[in-house]
Image (tube, grey):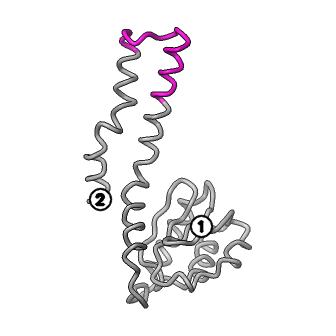
Amino acid sequence: MDHLNTGRTILKLVGEAGNIEHIEHCSTRLRLSLYDNAKVEVSDLKKLPEVMGVVTYVQCQIVIGKDVVKVFDAIRSLMANDADAKQKPVTKKKWNAWLIDFVISIFQPLIPAIAGGGVLKSILIILNMAGWLTKDSSTYQILDCIGTAPIYFLPLLIAITTA
């Protein structure tokens, strides 16, 4: 896969670098906050062999797969080279769309930690019910503390991702 050409094509199909307000990625998706979602050519994006899917609502999410970091880096470098990358918003986002975008950007990085803690707590419950691990054992107590930590420190984690 030629990541630079993929990035160049994606930039063209989302309305060039001037239409991108903010770009980030998770493990499989590019997440684009755009000034004007109407400029996105969804059908053409879906036809790209590197793109597994496209979802547009508040953000434009392009499912790339395991190569998302390389495509993200290529797009960032292309945007850095574009002198006209910043554009004023065509229309203001509605307050509810802005609020949803804000909440998503805060909680998205926390999902793996919260899910991991929940899975660990579930495994502990199963091991306890099977009789393989008692609640009094030090192993259970340490793993229980690790599983509880994401929820216990949730206010601190939210403050960090909000900043």
Question: What residue sits 56% from the left and 61% below the top?
Answer: 29
Side of 113 where 55 appears, left or right: right
User: How many numbered tags mark residues here?
Assistant: 2
Q: How far across and down, in percent of the image, does residue 39 sit?
A: 57, 86
Q: What residue type is labelled 1?
A: Ile
Q: Distance between the residues labelled 2 and 1?
A: 24 Å
Q: Which residue lies furthest to the front in this view?
A: 96
Question: Which tag, 2 or 1, sits closer to the chain's start?
Answer: 1
- Examine the rendered structure and indicate whether residue 61 appears above or below residue 17: above
Pick the front one: 141 or 74 = 141
- Examine the rendered structure and indicate whether residue 104 appears above or below residue 79: above
Q: How far across and down, in percent of the image, does residue 59 sit?
A: 50, 70
Question: What residue sits 50% from the left and 27% below the top?
Answer: 122
Question: What residue sits 52% from the left and 14% below the top?
Answer: 129
Q: Mark 1 packing: few (<14 Cα in 10 Å), some, or many (20+)?
A: many
Quadrant where the N terminus sits is bottom right
Side of 155 where 78 appears, left or right: right
Q: How far across and down, in percent of the image, does residue 25 sit?
A: 49, 61
Which disc, if any, is residue 144?
none
Question: What residue sits 46% from the left and 73% below the top?
Answer: 33
- The residue wearing badge 1 is 62
In terms of image quadrants, where is residue 105?
Answer: bottom left
- Examine the rendered structure and indicate whether residue 58 appears above or below residue 146: below
Is label 2 in a helix, a strand or a loop? helix
Quadrant where the C terminus sits is bottom left
Which stretch did the figure color magenta?
120-139
Principal SS element in the magenta part? helix
Pick the front one: 120 or 74 = 120
Q: How far across and down, in percent of the image, does residue 22 sit?
A: 42, 73
- The residue wearing badge 2 is 162
Pick the front one: 134 or 17 = 134
